């Protein structure tokens, strides 16, 4: 039986790569974003929503469960960044970043977590960033939103651990996607030089980690964070 995987933010970037990667592994993949996706595949369904919209998330997750009868994996990948000195950051940006990165992760984890609790099995992977442990200047709001995601994930791991559900984090270092395309080259170069492995990461470095967290053999791996490029 095919495993059922939900990936938020699957229209482009890392989420799109992961959707295609797990379709190749014969999973049934359900992806989410605010704009239409051009990904077509017999085992792929795309749902339009904003991850911050509690009611839309709840209705969609219930409809998916009704159709597929189970949800095995959730990857909370959808995210936005704000690169600016905090003195120049309006509160509206803070709200938007936290709505997407933290509340979006919360909404999906809660709704999918209820289903996984009943089936006594599940794997949840949330996204953080190396900007969090590096406390990068210019990324105060983005890094703070990912701090919230990290703490939430570690507590969730404790609250769900006895139910056969694992909750882990991947923290990519820079990968060439739209998320980072407006960051000045010298800033990215400086960041890459702070890494133990001073190179851009690639999409396949992410799937290497998600494969590990999703694996049946990883049933004792929970509450953990893997940052790429040797940042810790
Ligand atoms: N790329 C990097 O260097 C890097 C480094 C560290 C961490 N990360 C993390 O990796 C994750 C993916 O980043 P990425 O680089 O792939 O970003 P990206 O290329 O900008 O893609 C973001 C995806 O999220 C979706 N999205 C954004 N806001 C949404 C919302 N409110 N509701 C639903 N979907 C939403 C976008 O689709 P729509 O616009 O259609 O909604 C898009 O599919 C993020 O959590 C990010 O923080 C990335």
Image: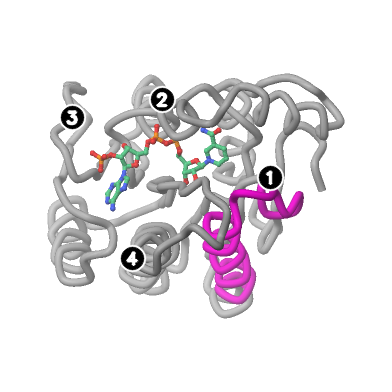
Which corner quadrant of the image does residue 111 belong to?
bottom left
Mark 2 beta carbon near ligand 1 (under 8 Å): yes
The label nearer to you, 1 versus 3, is: 1
Residue denoted by label 2: 17
Residue at (13, 53) in percent of width and height: 67
**Label placed on residue 143:** none
Q: Check if mark 1's residue and mark 3's residue have beta carbons within 8 Å.
A: no
Query: Label 1: few (<14), some or many (≥20) within 10 Å?
Result: many
| SS type, badge 2 | helix
Q: Is residue 119 visible?
A: no
Query: In the picture provided, is 147 more to the left or to the right than 18?
Result: right
- Quarter of the picture containing the N terminus is top left
For marks 4 and 3, the one nearer the N-term is 3
Query: Label 4: few (<14), some or many (≥20) within 10 Å?
Result: few
Which corner quadrant of the image does residue 16 belong to?
top left
Query: Toward the viewer: 190 or 40?
Result: 190
Residue at (46, 49) in percent of width and height: 82
Residue denoted by label 3: 37
Q: Which stretch is magenta?
A: 131-157
Furthest residue to the front? 88
Dominant secondary structure, magenta: helix
For marks 2 and 1, the one nearer the N-term is 2
Query: Toward the viewer: 179 or 140?
Result: 140
Question: Is residue 209 shown above or below 51?
Answer: above
Give the alpha-carbon distance from disc 2 to disc 1, as whole Å: 20 Å
For marks 1 and 4, the one nearer the N-term is 4
Residue denoted by label 4: 92
């Amino acid at each position: 039986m095919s495993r059922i995987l939900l990936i938020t933010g699957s229209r482009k970037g890392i989420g799109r790569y992961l959707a295609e990667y797990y379709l190749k592994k014969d999973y049934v993949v359900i992806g989410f974003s605010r704009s239409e996706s051009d990904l077509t595949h017999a085992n792929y369904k795309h749902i339009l929503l904003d991850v911050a919209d509690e009611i839309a998330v709840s209705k969609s997750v219930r409809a998916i469960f009704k159709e597929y009868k189970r949800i095995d994996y959730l990857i909370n990948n959808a995210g936005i960044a704000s690169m600016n000195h905090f003195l120049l950051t309006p509160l509206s940006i803070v709200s938007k970043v936290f709505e997407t990165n933290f509340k979006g992760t919360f909404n999906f984890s809660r709704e999918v977590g209820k289903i996984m609790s009943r089936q006594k099995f599940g794997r949840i992977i949330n996204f953080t960033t190396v900007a969090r442990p590096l406390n990068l200047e210019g990324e105060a709001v983005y890094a703070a939103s990912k701090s919230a995601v990290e703490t939430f994930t570690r507590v969730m791991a404790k609250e769900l651990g006895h139910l056969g559900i694992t909750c882990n984090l991947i923290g990519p270092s820079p990968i060439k996607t739209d998320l980072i395309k407006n960051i000045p080259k010298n800033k990215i170069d400086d960041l890459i030089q702070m890494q133990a492995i001073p190179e851009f990461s690639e999409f396949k470095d992410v799937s290497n980690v998600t494969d590990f967290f999703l694996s049946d053999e990883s049933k004792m791996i929970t509450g953990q964070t893997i940052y790429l490029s040797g940042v810790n």
